[in-house]
Amino acid sequence: MKSLLYGVLLAGVAFAQVPFPNPQYLPPDASEGTQATQNSTIPNPQWSNLLGNALFYYDAQRSGKLPSTNRVSWRNDSCLTDGSDVGLDLSGGYYDAGDYIKATYPLSFTLMSTCWGALQFGQGYEISNQTAYLDSMLRWGLDWIIKAHPENNTLYVLVADIPSEGNYWGGDLDIPTPRTSYQINDTHPGTDAAAQASAAFSSCALLYSGVSFNSSSATSIKNDTYASLLLSHAQSLYSFAASASGGQQVYQNAVPEVADAYSSSGFQDDMVAAELFLGLATNSSDLIEQASQRYLQNQLGGSGGVFNWDSKTPGLAVLFSQIATTRSDLAGNLTGWQTEAERYFDDIVNDKSSSDASLTGGGLLWYNGDSDEASLNPALNAAMLMSLYSPFATSSSKSSSYETFAGNQLNYALGNNPMSSPYVVGMNPNSPQNPHSALASGGDNVAQIDSVPAQEAYVLYGAVIGGPDKNDRMYDIRSDWPEMEPALDLNAPMLTLAALHVMNDAADPFFVSLKNGAYASKKPSGTPCDAAFPCKKSGLSNAGKIALAIVLSLVGVLIIIVLAFFYNRRRAKRF
Ligand SMILES: *[C@@H]1O[C@H](CO)[C@@H](O)[C@H](O)[C@H]1NC(C)=O
Ligand SMILES: *[C@@H]1O[C@H](CO)[C@@H](O)[C@H](O)[C@H]1NC(C)=O
Ligand SMILES: *[C@@H]1O[C@H](CO)[C@@H](O)[C@H](O)[C@H]1NC(C)=O
Ligand SMILES: *[C@@H]1O[C@H](CO)[C@@H](O)[C@H](O)[C@H]1NC(C)=O
Ligand SMILES: *[C@@H]1O[C@H](CO)[C@@H](O)[C@H](O)[C@H]1NC(C)=O
Ligand SMILES: *[C@@H]1O[C@H](CO)[C@@H](O)[C@H](O)[C@H]1NC(C)=O
Ligand SMILES: *[C@@H]1O[C@H](CO)[C@@H](O)[C@H](O)[C@H]1NC(C)=O
Ligand SMILES: *[C@@H]1O[C@H](CO)[C@@H](O)[C@H](O)[C@H]1NC(C)=O
Ligand SMILES: *[C@@H]1O[C@H](CO)[C@@H](O)[C@H](O)[C@H]1NC(C)=O
């Protein structure tokens, strides 16, 4: 009897999270993504696979000692001594993108986005049997940020230097050391990074407390012990963000080393997000009122820009609307927040000039500047926000216009585009073959990144690539990081959108209709024209070139002035 009890307790310890399905979910071969589902019902197996694969991508990105339950056969333990330079264990967490840095700010955004989506579409994870993988994905990130937050006013925001071109390209066995750990602290604060980490913890604390924005869509992830651990970090990080003795500032002022990839344009949006999620998690109408005052004082309304790891502003009116609807005891002004959310969405849907966006010829939502690298990110994030907001809209016609627009963007990403390629690795034979990922490539010579090996060693299942260019072209060239590099934050909206479709959609996703060879017949020849590839030279004479150069440099100066005016933030520059 005693040993039985002991065994039960041990099992409890071994399953510190939702138990995995037995057998474990593994991505099927890409060829299965052409098999039309017979007599399909909800959940449709192809949507379930998309959600399962999108989560599987995060398993492939793990750093540290891999658990016995690791599903990615080709991954090894790595970077076990991270943090040793500062006397801490900072092993674990996730590699950010195609390289091996660990970056707290975009990771926190990713976790917040994922928990926010699951607060509404949690049933999608449930009925596809993916809740255990959601739980392990979240814990792998959150547990690492807990380690990166060893004291109230200390948060590590970067481990390992952001690589420049020509740096390490190879697998996970020889990742170069030393790897420096960079922190923000009381005298050198980073308001945005601390507030965003707080928002990640409180949004996920809500999920682990069993809260849902849709009462019929809760998940079995509920765990009050874990929720209260997350909430204590959320509170501490919020205090750090709000009242560090060094004041409030963007985090690259404290840690300039982050600036090359993840420079932040401001912190008020992060502060509002932190106050909203923390206010909801602690039932504090004061915090939510403070968020509302901050939003109005900083004039965050009226924006037409993107939603992403740097800019949360377009999501705030959505979150205010969700809280004012589901918890009217905590937040008021529902009509005001709906008006602001719908102004933003209607401008996009109706292609108004007050939105910074327009559609490409093939139908992708495009923001000049922001979409030049990782073009799918602004489009999928807009689709995610519209999908989260749709049930809270003021009329069913608005709901359906947002759902239609969001569905079109998602369909584009899933293959309804001029390349006939679903931009998720391993979903279909027409999926990209060459994601820019040092982990998956199998090569170890950056000078031969595109040719050795000819075929990537490992299929990076579930990874959303950066996305096509403004002419809807995707070249599938490994070194072309603006188009081909997956990243943690790029997959987050795909999780939420896939979970929604698992819940609501019996029909197959678009890619199932794509026949073998569809992309091959459309693949553009030559090379792209972007930050990784110099644009092709024109066929002009030398005199013509000089004349053109003079004109272009004048135009260039003008463009730079205009761009500097409109785009006061730097975008991710990933290698
Ligand atoms: C809840 O989470 C805590 C903290 O991670 C863990 O120790 C515990 O085993 C979990 N409980 C269940 C029932 O999963
Ligand atoms: C699909 O439904 C049809 C008609 O109801 C039935 O004849 C057929 O056997 C079903 N196919 C499968 C694979 O269940
Ligand atoms: C989920 O698991 C249940 C029980 O094992 C199984 O019957 C069902 O087919 C699974 N659903 C999916 C989508 O994998
Ligand atoms: C993991 O180690 C094996 C050798 O044990 C190696 O073949 C494989 O390429 C490594 N994986 C990566 C991502 O480098
Ligand atoms: C605080 O952070 C700054 C910037 O990372 C760093 O230079 C300084 O050493 C840190 N202070 C302490 C006490 O660790
Ligand atoms: C809530 O979730 C259920 C499925 O569990 C879904 O049918 C319903 O449309 C959702 N409602 C809202 C308002 O999102
Ligand atoms: C750390 O922060 C928590 C939550 O804000 C607070 O309760 C605790 O007293 C703080 N600890 C120290 C040592 O200041
Ligand atoms: C917040 O309020 C809700 C609804 O009144 C309640 O269910 C929940 O337990 C409260 N949470 C906390 C942390 O007090
Ligand atoms: C309500 O929200 C709107 C934002 O759309 C804002 O302009 C207005 O001032 C808010 N009203 C109050 C009373 O907070």
Image: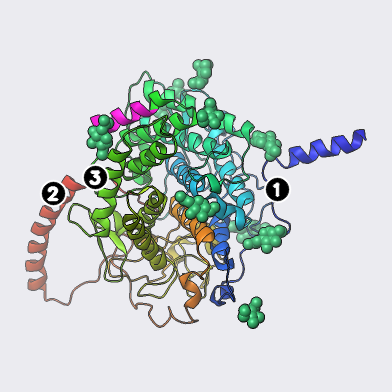
Q: Quadrant of residue 439?
A: bottom right
Q: Position of residue 6 (x, y in %)?
A: 85, 35
Q: Nearer the viewer, residue 5 or 68?
A: 5
Q: Nearer the viewer, residue 77 or 361?
A: 361
Q: Nearer the viewer, residue 11 or 397?
A: 397
Cβ of mark 2 under 8 Å from ligand 9: the answer is no
Asked if the residue under mark 3 is in contact with the one under mark 2, i.e. CB atoms within 8 Å, the reply is no
Q: Nearer the viewer, mark 2 or mark 3?
A: 3
Residue occupied by mark 3: 303
Q: Which kind of residue does numbered mark 3 sit on?
A: Ser
For the stretch drawn in magenta, what is the main secondary structure? helix
Instruction: Give the vertical position of 41 relative to 141 (above or below).
Output: below
The numbered mark at residue 19 is 1
Between the C-alphas of marks 2 and 3, the distance is: 21 Å
- What is the magenta range? 288-300
Q: Which kind of residue does numbered mark 2 sit on?
A: Ile
Residue in view at x 37 percent, y 24 percent: 242
Q: Which kind of residue does numbered mark 1 sit on?
A: Pro
Between the C-alphas of marks 1 and 3, the distance is: 43 Å
Q: Element type at marker 2?
A: helix
Residue occupied by mark 2: 561
